[in-house]
Image (cartoon, rainbow, N blue to C red):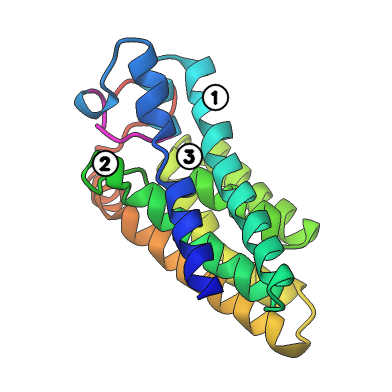
Amino acid sequence: MILLIIAALSYLIGSIPSGYLVAKSQGIDIREHGSRNIGATNVLRVVGKKWGYLVFFCDSFKGFFAVKLGATIAAHALFSPVLGSVIAAIACILGHNYTLWLRFKGGKGIATSAGVVLALFPVLVVLSVALIWIVVFFAARYVSLASIVAAVALPFVVFFTTRKSGSDFWILFGFSVLIGALAVWRHHSNIGRLLNGTESRFGKKS
């Protein structure tokens, strides 16, 4: 029952459509512009940099807050904090990707996943994945490609940099595989455009 409560609360936190709300505050329905995605990248391109950065912060904070809340609730109920954190993380990302407020259409979960990773994993994992994203982004100028490569790299970074002791490691490793795969799946349309050479580079309008 406690895990269901954690999942429900985290889904609701994740489902807050930050990008839609921020763009709407500027008189724009972000679903009708650019890539029609409610994520930070599309908001940045359509509404402006400061609004895109605000959306990234809000979406990241959702993931970070949900994980910490899940761990706290689980610990008070004498459940594994790691398991509570992972349940919260999955539910929050799904809430962002499939928000009930917008007919279950949301973002791609990268910013929310970044907040989750920051809350769940050691600093070395966070810095390694962030560095991979930065290197790919500045080499190719594709946000989508950087996000895909970082998502694929996450399980490998976790496996090779984290101490493999107890069940907590395998819970976190399994989670890293799951969210990495989900991020790649959510970028399937971007992958098609990358292969066709029609994906928009950062700094250029879609």
- Checking the image for residue 115, the label placed there is none
Could you give the CA–CA distance between mark 1 and mark 3, rounded to whole angstroms? 24 Å
The picture places residue 113, in percent across and down from the top left corner, at 53, 52
Q: CA distance from mark 2 to mark 1?
A: 29 Å
- Give the residue number, with chain letter if any, for mark 2: 197
Q: Amino acid at mark 1?
A: Leu
Asked if residue 94 lies left or right of residue 128, the reply is: left
Query: Between marks 3 and 2, how big is the CA–CA gap?
Result: 12 Å
Residue bearing mark 3: 140
Give the secondary structure at mark 2.
Answer: loop
Amino acid under label 2? Gly
Q: Circle 1 — which element?
A: helix
Residue drawn at (58%, 33%) of the image: 57
Classify 56 as above or below 149: above
Relative side of 13 to 34, left or right: right
Contact, mark 3 vs mark 2 (Cβ under 8 Å) = no
Residue range of the region highlighted in magenta in the rendering: 33-39
Q: Name the residue at 39% across, 52% down.
A: 95
For residue 35, what is the image quadrant? Answer: top left
Residue, far top:
27
List the residue tagged with mark 1.
54
Vertical position of residue 8 compared to residue 133: above or below: below
Quick check: 191 left or right of 81? left
Q: Please tell me which residue is depicted at 30% across the width and 52% down the height of the picture.
A: 191
| Viewport quadrant of the C terminus | top left
Q: Main secondary structure of the magenta part?
A: loop
**Which SS class for mark 3?**
helix
Q: Nearer the viewer, mark 1 or mark 3?
A: 1
How far across and down, in percent of the image, does residue 204 sit?
Answer: 37, 21
Mark positioned earlier in the residue sequence (2 or 1): 1
